[in-house]
Image (cartoon, grey):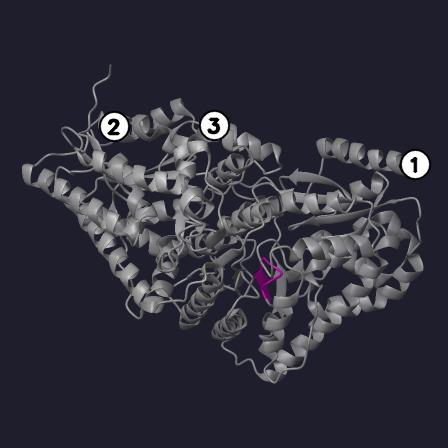
Amino acid sequence: MAKRNYRPLASVKALQKTMGRYYALTNYHRYWGKPFRRPLAWVTSGAPVELLRSFKIHSAYPEQYAAIYSARNTTVALCEIADSAGYSQDLCSYARSNIGGVLRPDLAPLGGMPKPDLLVACNNICGTVLKWYEALARHFNIPLLVLDTPYLTDEMTQQAKDYVLEQLYAMAVDLEKITGRPFNEKNLAKQMRQSAEITSLWKETRQYCQANPSPLNAPDLFIHMAPIVVLRGSQEGIDYYRKLKAEVKERVALGQGAVENERIRLVWDNIAIWPQLFTFYKMFADKGACFVSDTYSGGWASLQSPGTPMESLATTYTEVFLNRSPEFRANQLINLIRDYKADGFVMHSNRSCKPYSLVQEVIRKKVMRETGVPGLMIEADMADLRAYAEEPVRNRVQAFLETFD
Amino acid sequence: MSEITEHVKNKSLELLLEEATLNGAARILRYPKSRFFGYFCSYFPEELILAAGLEPLRLLPDTGNSTPAELPAYCCSLAKGTLDMEIRGKWQDLAGIGFTHTCDTMQCLSGIWAASGHSKTIDIVPPVMLNTSGASRYYLAEMHSLLNSLMALTQNKINKEALQDALKLCTYTRKLATELDALRPDLPSQMVSSLMRAGQVMPRLDYSQALEKCLPALKEMAEPNQHRLKVLISGAVVENDSLFAMIEDLGGRVVADDTCTGYRHYSGPTVMEAEDPLVDIVRRYTEMPPCPCKNRSLNERMAYLNDLAHQRQVKCAIIVIRKYCDPHAWDAVALSESFRNSGIRTLTLELEGADVGGQERTRLQAFLESMKADSEL
């Protein structure tokens, strides 16, 4: 058996316990949701979940389930169900596998997702989520609430902020009707405080990776981001990230790196290649290359904007990096390379995520020009293994890593 | 097309058909006094371009096979083709290029263009949820921002009178296009497609004058045809008439058109009621039949297209998906289901660009022949 060249985290057990509890609660929602008057919402990863939590709505994340489907190698079968229902093979593989799981839950891991009472989408991550959630709303015949966050070609504008804020107040009215609970700003403020604490813990944990050697590698970041996606605003999330931070801090104090004999420090751009999570990054770890930071899981490390809870929600959720210009994103990558003393970067040109991927070549050129470090582009898909050509990818990775010899 | 113009020696008609074939390629030679401003999407307000003293030019790719290094292969040929033309200097005479945030690709293309192109770019980010709280206020503010950007670009003030004149010209053009659209069942499909597209690639006043002049001739040409299969077509940008010609060749007739470059570009209300012309412009773009990138309510687009199909008594629908055009691909599923529920047979046709070949002919032929066979039973 090939030797593993990375150091596993003890926090994985706490992660499994935290996430196991969340999935158990979610999958058995039908037993407790109605008695406790707590509807189940399917939400996009960029939806203002703190507002939903303030109404005691339980949220489930189709994107995260799709990542699980992929890690368990069921994406292709589920996508084929969606394909035969008429959805083009070129559409997002998260969306298609989710729809496949809706149409054939018997084929989906965990028995598919539990049936939702409402849908909440925010288009700050892409336009696909609107079309995807429209399809779900037609299928389930349930309310669809959409937060339209205008794309920021430059800085946030007053009109965009006012527009998003007005929608959030309208969404609160809709949620009052759906849940039968009144909007309570204090509840929202509490959720926001807890969410801010989780974000700070995640940010601080990530910053430890500026140490040499880095205590975490990309697979660690991708696996341990799960609670910040689904448990933003929760005490369980805070408890978990305190543990993780303590372990990572200790690693730094002991000089323990995630990758043995770290000699190349890299930054990752785009969503993980979930079905190849360990084999792909092992190619790098075997050569002493560690991904010390990434733009994707870092998306959840942005601190909240100031203002009232609603104002803060409006700005924070509109300013997410995928809703920003290539100029902004290039600068973000440049800062990561400088702050984390990276020797290079790898971009995943992800067929399923156009807003993340189409601008990458322009960003790659700018980052290489301004930092002087090399950048590699790999074409694949975050979930659909059919888009991953193993040998060409291996050859490109090897050639890239040889440039550091 | 030549046999059509041979029968009708109408100079205005010939001009419009030529302009549609050129897609704006000869603009400098033909209209040396005009300054053009490029745009991609029907949601970019032409009124503001005209009020700025510029001529709106819809940017269309000259080939479906471009592969600029700045874009990956899994990107639509509209984006790849037009960006490739920018890199080849084909748009260098333009005063600027306007981007509307509609799909993810257009959103990305704006940033890529600004980083790697030579042209000045201007953005407008309309609301996606057109009927949601605060959308009209936000849209109006965006419209004012666009006006300011255009004034900065041209170094000229755009006054209310200029906006009202532009609104009047657009209103008149849309009225003429609506008259043309009403003649659609009785005119060759590819000719109407050309005439609609001409109005997006040549100076607007010249277009409306030419269309006005040739409408009587078109009415004369119109021949009620009971034998052709009545087809509805829905899709994104279609930069040439090859699909329309093939439908016609196979015994069909496009009697209802919901393409970005077809009648959808002109359809919807144009009002001139408000003190601020921008309010009227916002209202028009909010109330025009939505494309898949916009949402007025969950099923409004499906309901509109079903109504249109019934008004025009269509027998079948063809949904054209440009390869990698996500919004249209998403809507194709719900749209074909809603058509099926209304008894309208539907074919979803995926095309790399606008050109159709042997493979498409086989599919179209089988589809249209099956429709004919059903109607003969």
Q: Which residues are magenta?
A: B34-44
- x and y, in percent, of residue B250 in the image: 84, 38
Q: Earlier in the sequence, mark 3 or mark 2?
A: 3
Front residue of this view, candidates A316 and B35 = A316
Mark 2 Cα shell of 10 Å, populated few (<14), some (14-19), many (≥20): few
Report in which chain the residue with disc 2 lies. Answer: A
Label 2 sits on a secondary structure element that is helix
Dot 1 falls on a residue whose secondary structure is helix
What amino acid is at disc 1? Glu
Q: Which mark is residue A386?
A: 3
- Res B311 visible: yes
In this picture, is B32 found above or below B355?
below
In the image, which is nearer the foreground, mark 1 or mark 2?
Answer: 1
Cα gap from disc 3 to disc 2, whole angstroms: 27 Å
Residue type at numbered disc 3: Arg
What type of secondary structure mainly makes up the magenta span? loop
Query: Which residue is denoted by mark 1 in the rendering?
Result: B376
Residue nearest the observer in this picture, B205 or A16: A16
Please report the residue visible at 83 percent of the width from the left and 55 percent of the height from the top.
Answer: B184
Q: Residue furthest front?
A: A35
User: Going by the image, does B344 lie left or right of A288?
Assistant: right
Describe residue B17's horizontal placement relative to residue A257 as left or right: right
Co-location on one chain, circles 3 and 2? yes
- Closest to the camera, between mark 3 and mark 1, is 1
Residue under disc 3 on the same chain as residue under disc 1: no
On residue A402, which mark appears?
2
